[in-house]
Amino acid sequence: MKILVTGGLGYIGSHTVVKLIENKDEVVIVDNLFNSKLVVLDRIESITGVRPTFYQNDVQDAEKLDAIFAKERPEAVIHFAGYKAVGESVAKPLMYYQNNLESTFVLLRCMEKYHCNNIVFSSSATVYGLPDSVPVTEESPVKSATSPYGETKVMIERILSDVAAVHPEMNVALLRYFNPIGAHKSGLLGEDPNGIPNNLLPYINRVACGLLDHLNVFGNDYPTPDGTGVRDYIHVVDLAQGHLLALKKLQSNPGLVIYNLGTGKGTSVLEVIQAYEKATGVKIPYEIKERRPGDVPENYASTDKARRELGFKCQYNVEDACLDGYNFQKAELERNK
Ligand code: NAD
Ligand code: UFG
């Protein structure tokens, strides 16, 4: 199948592109390199032996996207492109609403015009807000999000649902990711954010490689077994596989479908530190700090629906992801020397 992947050079997109190529799908990437580098294309090629078609374009550029659709005629789209930094979205709401919503509008108009009826959208567990109970199922209520970033996910889910409701020929998969971590085994693909990382694993990777002195653990007085925040950390390669399964599902013309993509297991911050140390043999010094505003105590997925309907099952655990993430960070440092 020919698949247009927006944001395909980003963290989750690049791992998914590798899986698609390994599955013999034809991939067309549209990415403006806002948060990725062109070298990722070379690395996808060196892992798979295939260089996917690449357009360095903003998805919001309607004329250019129209030309890409006219030429490529994709049968399906995976829509990763978007801004994703929660804190930045609070500081720059307009930038987030503009990019995340407008890129979706432009994409949907092209899909309509060129009769491309299948879309997989990168949503997030953030749409569950502060969950009433865990694990969260796909039927758990979608709540007003705690950040403009999260709000864009709630809004785009709604837009896609409304569009699907009046287009019976359209198939939409809303994939609610939990916490993607880890990297490709090759050490060539992974997550290496600019500046001081906001997310736990990128921060720990920097500590492990001696770039930061210690980890700040945000709160140890949550109502969780050890008092630190609990999340559902999923290896990015497992997450990537989930996209292939979702695309396969769309071929049965299901209309709108929604799946949690997580492991079904909650892991606390202290447990992540332990797993990291065990997997890598590197000690992670940490200090307990105040809670981070906006954090929920505990969030992990019910994965029953994805297992039942997609056959989704994770192959990797948190330790595997810690080791792969560490190896990527080390390799990246070597390459940047
Ligand atoms: P990422 O920033 O690594 O990848 C996004 C890619 O989209 C980048 O390569 C960026 O350059 C590109 N992009 C952004 N705006 C664009 C535009 N207007 N036109 C073209 N390209 C554009 O992020 P990621 O972690 O790979 O996340 C991918 C998607 O998954 C995002 O929509 C994100 O919100 C969602 N998501 C991520 C997480 C996470 O923790 N990483 C969790 C839940 C959901
Ligand atoms: N944490 C620390 N220290 C750090 C960073 C994080 O203790 O330096 C803790 C947090 O308090 C939380 C856990 O580690 O308990 C995970 O935090 P992350 O920032 O890695 O992930 P979040 O669950 O806060 O955020 C993720 C995605 C968002 C998404 C959100 C809700 O990064 O995109 O899940 O689904 F919106």
Image (cartoon, grey):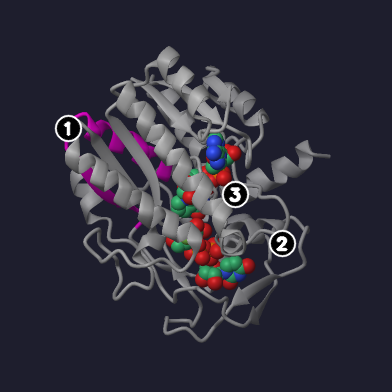
- Do we see residue 148 in this rendering? yes
Q: Is residue 311 above or below residue 169?
A: below
Residue under the image location 63 percent in, 24 percent down? 42
Q: Is residue 189 above or below residue 306?
A: above
Q: Please tell me whether mark 1 sits on a helix, a strand or a loop.
A: loop
- The answer to whether mark 3 and mark 1 are in CB contact below 8 A is no
Q: Residue furthest top?
A: 71
Q: Cα distance, mark 2 to mark 1?
A: 47 Å
Amino acid type shown at disc 1: Asn
Q: Quadrant of the C terminus?
A: top right
The question of residue 255 being in magenta is answered with yes
Question: Does 286 sit left or right of 337 as displayed?
Answer: left
- Among the two numbered marks 2 and 3 on one chain, the one whose residue lies closer to the N terminus: 2
Q: Which residue is mark 2?
A: 207
At which x and y percent is residue 76?
Answer: 33, 27
Structural crowding at the residue carrying mark 3, measured as other residues with C-alpha within 10 Å and reported as few (<14), some (14–19) or many (≥20) = many
Q: Is residue 332 above or below residue 279?
A: above
Q: Which residue is mark 3?
A: 325
Q: Nearer the viewer, residue 59 or 225?
A: 59
Amino acid type shown at disc 3: Gly
Residue under the image location 37 percent in, 57 percent down? 154
Camera-nearest label, 3 or 1: 1
Range of residues picked out in magenta: 239-263
At which x and y percent is residue 36?
Answer: 63, 38
Q: Cα distance, mark 2 to mark 3?
A: 12 Å
Q: Which residue is mark 1?
A: 253
Q: Nearer the viewer, residue 277 or 15?
A: 15
Camera-nearest label, 2 or 1: 1
Q: Please tell me whether mark 2 sits on a helix, a strand or a loop.
A: helix
